[in-house]
Image (tube, rainbow, N blue to C red):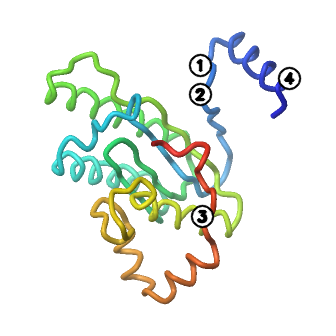
Amino acid sequence: MSPQERVRALELRRARHLPWHSPPHLDLQGTRQYLISAACYEHHHIIGKSAERMTDCEESLLELYRDCCLAVYAWCLLPNHYHCLIRTHNIEQVRHELGQFHGRSSHAWNGEDGARGRKVWHNCFERPIKSDRHFWATLNYVHHNPVYHRYVAHWQNWPWSSAAEFLEQVGREHAIEMWERYPILDYGKKWDLD
């Protein structure tokens, strides 16, 4: 976007009383694949307060995605954000269910932490997958995220991810081939949820 286009976009968002910098949600029609990402407010490690909370959050998210998506290809839950690669025919329903989950988890975690009124979730957005190359680079990115954020040295060692399951399903040689064929390069560099 040029500087003039950015100014016009912000003016339009202000005029419509929309948040100035929130990503737009595109309600694309038909069955599509998406990368869903969400972060804790100001990147606080609210999800990661304990291993139990991480596990409960992962289980709840996977149940939600499996109930309202056609496929869950990859996921990764970190202490302050998560990514999930899915296929759905109704992204509006997925966003609605995620909104409900974010509300319930905020209420529960704020009660557990004695932090009523604390903002837990800040940003949730979906990126439509545009091609096979984009899909595989995204899958590699999701599985590599714990390494990128320095939680583990090897992506298959992160317990709150589909990486080990993926490796078991496709085998080490195929996983290496997909990694080399579809490298992540700078994928997520400007928008990854630190």
Q: Report the disc number at residue 19.
A: 1
Disc 2 and disc 4: Cα gap in Å?
A: 18 Å
Q: Is residue 70 above or below residue 56?
A: below
User: Does the residue at mark 4 contact the one at mark 3 (Cβ under 8 Å)?
Assistant: no
Disc 4 and disc 1: Cα gap in Å?
A: 19 Å
Neighbourhood count class around disc 1 (C-alpha, 10 Å): few under 14, some 14–19, many 20 upward? few
Instruction: Give the mark nearest the N terminus, 3 or 1.
Output: 1
Instruction: Give the mark nearest the N terminus, 2 or 4.
Output: 4
Tag 4: amino acid: Gln
Q: Is residue 97 above or below residue 136?
A: above
Neighbourhood count class around disc 4 (C-alpha, 10 Å): few under 14, some 14–19, many 20 upward? few
Disc 4 and disc 3: Cα gap in Å?
A: 31 Å
Disc 3 and disc 2: Cα gap in Å?
A: 25 Å
The residue indicated by pointer 4 is 4
Which percent across, then down, holds residue 190? 61, 44
What residue is drawn where x is 61% and y is 70%?
A: 183
Tag 1: amino acid: Pro
The residue indicated by pointer 3 is 184
Neighbourhood count class around disc 2 (C-alpha, 10 Å): few under 14, some 14–19, many 20 upward? few
